[in-house]
Amino acid sequence: MNILVTLDSNYILPLKVMLWSLFFNNPGHSFNIYLMHSSISSEELEGIYEFTERLNQRLHVITLDEDLFEDAPVILHYTREMYYRLLAYKCLPEDLERVLYLDPDILIINSIRELYHMDMSNAMFAAACHNRRIPLKEINRLRLKVQEMEGYFNSGVLLMNLPLQREKIKEEDIFEFVEKKKNRLIFPDQDVLNALYYREIKKIDEIKYNYDVRFYQYNKILSNGLFDMDYVMRHTAILHFCGRKKPWHKNYNGKFLSLYKHYQILALERSDKTLRHLAGNNPAK
Amino acid sequence: MNILVTLDSNYILPLKVMLWSLFFNNPGHSFNIYLMHSSISSEELEGIYEFTERLNQRLHVITLDEDLFEDAPVILHYTREMYYRLLAYKCLPEDLERVLYLDPDILIINSIRELYHMDMSNAMFAAACHNRRIPLKEINRLRLKVQEMEGYFNSGVLLMNLPLQREKIKEEDIFEFVEKKKNRLIFPDQDVLNALYYREIKKIDEIKYNYDVRFYQYNKILSNGLFDMDYVMRHTAILHFCGRKKPWHKNYNGKFLSLYKHYQILALERSDKTLRHLAGNNPAK
């Protein structure tokens, strides 16, 4: 399976935790990890290489010039890296057909095989909506001026149909849109995805493949006993630690903290033996 | 390593979760699991055999006659199984030197190697005290009439020095004590352990080897930031889900629920492939 990640140095720790959880919970699969970045140092990259190698998986680093997308408008607080996700197809190998983009603030706890191999038909993307908060849906509809918008797709888990993207995504469209809406964009790349490509996204089950852990109590209370920790652990493949508070920050305190921290220790602090034990199971190389 | 468990049918599910977590977090070790029981059906035993066999570990079932310890006094609500732990040495192989008793409401999240191989010197047992609630300590001192008692040992994790036990533990002493104190015993076997063998127990670190998860918030608040989930995941080897509410019950809601439930799925519901992947790492047989 092909996996795409884009990050800076601040996210190397969670990236490793995410990758470890992905490999561990998808035994028997080999992965190609495409890492797009513009500012990670060579020492840090070496560390990521060593990590994936020990786990018998392949890492491909794509270092982007800082002047890539130099025509692109820049918004306060955001760098040009906000375009990497939407314009990834330009930097990935030309013959790549499918790639799954994953945010680093994610923990994989079950198989993603069905997601990865799903029928995308004519969709350019597959993604989940995070739209339980109704007012937010209305605000986004008005803000982005997409009248028929029924939800707001989260771009943290994004399955990409690359041949179709090469055909249809034009960087000028994106830059023009950003230039025009500059003052209204909150999550720039996610807003662009929703505003420009809303009709080209196939919806996936958010509880299975992009579960916003902040909503656990809310879902549990509304479910009349159908939804609980058992349900999540059995059905969810991708836990997404959305929002500003992250489980690797000092005072994070959510329902999934013990699970995340245990994976963090497994991924980063256990002896090579445990890592090899996992790695030995994967047939890559 | 030799592990002792004693249980009835109600604890088969948690037993499997406990064993899976033990094997997974102690890779490269082979285990002999001694299961003492008097009422588990042969179908259920067959299931436990299959489970440990798939994980390349050895199970030894010790079926006790119901009339064993027939001279023993019985206390309301408790069966004679309460004596199994303290008199285990009588039913285990005669040449066994050391065994680690573990309750089934436990999750092993790090190595227990150092605990298992610790120097026991002249102690018959090694155990941890759960005595953070000061009044409880006083009550136990009065209740059990052991004046110099500085803590109350929890019998959920009990390392046993079997040659010394064969020499020193007399079943008559135990029966006599129980007969006399019948009305004062709350946790019969634990009370006997504390009252009769208090001086023969070597203390082990409770946070490392018998962490009562109900105290997490309490420890965290009192620690001035030194104790948190990071600390537990890095230093604790044995999480103990003490008390009436258990993580496999429907409405349990503790800080370690997500971790427990994930292990439950790994142990009981994942395909053989994941199990073999673990098992392949263990050199037993």
Image (cartoon, coloured by chain):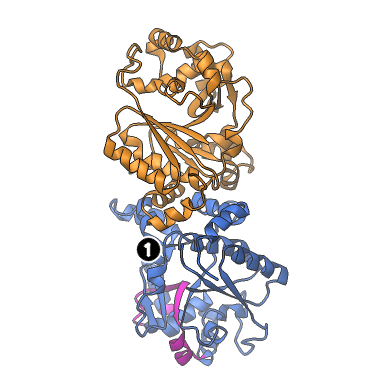
Chain colours: A blue, B orange
Counting from the top left corner in percent of width and height, residue B10 is at 32, 35
Disc 1 chain ID: A
Image point 54% across, 82% down: which residue? A88
- Relative vertical location of residue B133 with respect to residue A197 in this rendering, above or below: above
Residue that numbered label 1 is attached to = A207
Q: What element carries label 1?
A: helix
- Relative vertical location of residue B75 with respect to residue A78 in this rendering, above or below: above
Residue A116 sits in which quadrant? bottom left
- Relative vertical location of residue B99 with respect to residue A188 in this rendering, above or below: above
**Frontmost residue, B145 versus A55:** A55
In this rendering, the count of numbered labels is: 1
- Relative vertical location of residue A223 with respect to residue B144 in this rendering, above or below: below
Span highlighted in magenta in the image? A142-170
Q: Can residue B249 be seen in this view?
A: no
Counting from the top left corner in percent of width and height, residue B157 is at 50, 31
In-image side of B118 versus B215 (left or right): right
Q: Inspect the magenta stretch and tell me whether residue A261 lies in it.
A: no
**Frontmost residue, A169 versus A266:** A266
Q: Inspect the magenta stretch and tell me whether residue A151 lies in it.
A: yes
Counting from the top left corner in percent of width and height, residue B242 is at 44, 33
Question: What amino acid is at disc 1?
Answer: Ile
Q: Can residue B268 be seen in this view?
A: yes
